[in-house]
Amino acid sequence: MNEWFSAEERLPESGEEVLIWYSYFRYGDYNAYYQTYGLAYYIEEYKGWYGQDASGTDFKVLYWAPLPKPPEM
């Protein structure tokens, strides 16, 4: 799993959970942009990213990568 896709050039299948690299603005004592990773999914119908890590002010997904397949039991 080393293939990252630019979110501006290509989006994942609607509803597919993926690993994301995103930026967000943090207010308060910080007042700065940060970049980090998380899990989210894109919903084509609403043209937006959702999930536990897909929230916040000035949130923008920069890149995404498919998750690896789970281990076989």
Image (cartoon, grey):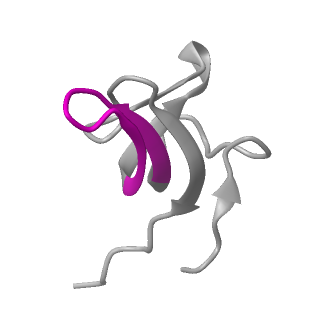
Residue with the most extreme right position:
9
Q: Look at the image and tell me in which quarter the C terminus lies.
A: bottom left
> Residue 28 vs residue 69: left or right?
left
Residue with the most extreme top position:
46
Task: Examine the image and state in which quarter residue 31 appears.
Answer: top left
Where does the image place residue 7, in percent across and percent down from the top left?
A: 67, 45
Up-down relation of residue 21 to residue 53 (above or below): below
Number of numbered labels in the structure image: 0
Q: Residue at x 55, y 62 (%)?
A: 65
> Residue 45 vs residue 6: left or right?
left
Along the line of sight, which residue is nearer the eye, 27 or 21?
Answer: 27
Where does the image place residue 70, in percent across and percent down from the top left?
A: 33, 75
Magenta region, mostly helix, strand or loop?
strand
Q: Which residue is drawn at 39% across and 43% down?
A: 40
> Residue 61 vs residue 10: left or right?
left
Q: Residue at x 64, y 73 (%)?
A: 3
Give the magenta part as a residue range.
21-37
Where does the image place residue 30, in percent across and percent down from the top left?
A: 26, 38
Task: Examine the image and state in which quarter residue 32 appears.
Answer: top left
Q: Residue at x 62, y 46 (%)?
A: 12
Up-down relation of residue 64 to residue 2 (above or below): above
Residue with the most extreme front position:
29
Where does the image place residue 48, in percent across and percent down from the top left?
A: 53, 23
Task: Examine the image and state in which quarter residue 36 appears.
Answer: bottom left
Q: Look at the image and tell me in which quarter the N terminus lies.
A: bottom right
